[in-house]
Structure formats: structure tokens, C-alpha cells
Image (spheres, grey):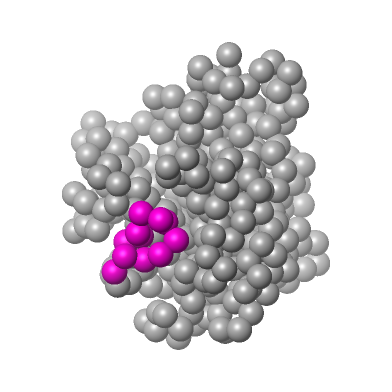
Amino acid sequence: MFAAASLLACAAHAANPLFPKLFTADPAALVDNGTVYLYVGHDQASPADKDYVMKEWRMYSSCDMKNWTDRGSPIQPSAFKWAIGKVDAWAADVTKRDGKYYFYATVDHAKIPGRAIGVAVSDKPEGPFVDARGSALVTNDMTLEAPIAWDDIDPGVFIDDDGQAYLYWGNTVMKYAKLKPNMIEFDGPIHTVGMDRFTEAPYLHKHKGTYYLSYSRDFPEETAYYTGPSATGPWKFQGVIMSKNEKVKTIHQAIVEFNGKNYIFYHNAKLPGGGEYRRSVAVEEFSYNADGTIPFIKQTKEGPAANPSAACK
């Protein structure tokens, strides 16, 4: 629980983008015991750089969606000794199971050409996270549907009500596989799903019995989604829920319910000096339509109103 002294350390920033002191991207959110834990990549490129420079992931926490505490860096790419591990802290996702926290991350493999997905584990949401396998969970040679080296990126992890866990990922082709209860091995084959103009960032969440599979569509990207009756479909396309950004081609969403309200995290490039490789994470509140669909969500400067949970007391 947060004490008043802890709140004084918060980056009490009441508007979007959330974190004005750093360029951040690719938000992954975990709600645990009345607290939102937000994991982001740290964009460290200079204005002159022509590619991503991301040497670490950062983590922030909030008990009210308004005041955020900087928890530092819970993990760096160098935690995966089998990876190149220097400047490739690409999109990740996190979940909790049996008292442990599992962090699925995109890194560049040192021996198998292409992007790979690793999994790290910690006893605390703020880390430190350590490599849970000593090897990659997914490598580029395991998926041959796309002739590119970056088609195994953007992991999104989901645990269903029956305890079955799934990992979703991909670029140009969406893939998923069941996870064993240990969360570090696949339980069965890798499947592919045909999706409308799929680019990347598959993310599954569940609301009132319906499964929502959101993703980045086209390039520059907009956020679109499908719904289905199970974690594996069949899927029905529902439309676009967030427009393309003006100064950056990516957008990358995470959707959570917190303290009775619903939120979508994403990134844009609206900090001063922002751009393609200098992005900024933001968040909006939304309400489902009466038929369960997600409305179109506008990006705002104000962000959501405060929503303090019992953890703030």
C-alpha cells in the first residue's frame, strides 16, 4: 500500500503524456492489489538518430491513475545472456501467476538471426527480473510465415479464467500458443491467425465474458480490434478504436480495468522534441458501449480523472 510519503515521490503529472522527463514507448500494464504497474521501453535516441536506442525498460506505479511513482528499471536486455543485449529493449508484456511476475520481452538473438522473445521472472512487480529459461522462448527460425527478421516481436500474455495461459505476438503475421503452467514453455504448437491488415502489437483482454483482441493495423498504425467467444476465437472484426499518430508511425496499446473503470495506454510523440524514435506514453479512460463494443477513443491532453483505489490509503 502507498503511504503519503510515497506519494510525495510521485511524478504528479496530471496530463498526457504521462512521463515528461523521459521518452517512453510500448506500454504494458498490470493491475495488482489496487495498483497499476506500467512497464515501458525507454527511448534514448538523440534527435539525429535514425533508429531506436532502447537500453532498458522502465516501470511506474499508480494507485489512482493520476500520480505515478518512478520505480526505475526492473530489467535490461543484458539480463538475457543469449541475446545481443545492448539497445534492443523493444515491446514487452507482464503478468502474475502463483505469486510470481513474468516479463515477456522482445530482444535480438545473438546466434539465431532475428528478433526473439525471452521470459524473465521476479518475486516482485518492480523486479529485479531474471531470465527464467536461459534461452529464448521464441526464435525467428521457429516461425517461417514472413520473410523478415522482426516478425517475432510484441508479446502479449493472457491468463484465462480457467488458468490456461496464452502468448500472442507477431509482425505482419499474428501468432499465438498456449503456455504451460510454469509460464516459460509452450504447451502445444504455434498457431497463426489471419487478421485485417495486421501489423503488430496483439493484445488480448476479457470483459464480461467477451474476448477482445486488439492490435496495430497498417503502417503508420491505428488501433483496431476483434471480439470472440474464447481466447482463440473465432474472431469478428469490430473496427478502429484509435487513430494514427501525427509524428510517429507506431502506437502500441494495452487495455486494463482498474478500480471499476477502463483504460487504454498507448504512445504518441507529443513531448517537446518527440519523434519517431522519441515517443511518449499516454492513457485514456473509456466506457464500453451498451452492446459491449469499444467506442472510438480520442487522444487527449487531460488524460483520465483521478480514480484512487484502497491502496492509496
Q: Of 254 and 132, which appears nearest the observer?
A: 132
Q: Of 206 and 241, which appears nearest the observer?
A: 206
Q: Quadrant of residue 56?
A: bottom right
Q: Relative to residue 224, is residue 287 depicted above or below?
A: above
Residue at 39% over, 84% down = 144
State which region is magenta. 178-188
Q: Of 106 and 274, which appears nearest the observer?
A: 106
Residue at 54% over, 20% down = 311
Q: Would you say residue 100 sits in the magenta stretch?
A: no
Q: Relative to residue 292, is residue 247 depicted above or below?
A: below
- Residue 33 picture location, percent across and down: 48, 28
Q: Relative to residue 228, is residue 113 depicted above or below?
A: below
Whether residue 269 is visible to the viewer of this picture, yes or no, is no
- Left or right of 214 on screen, residue 272: right
- Left or right of 258 on screen, residue 272: right
Quadrant for the C terminus, please.
top right
- Residue 6 picture location, percent across and down: 71, 23
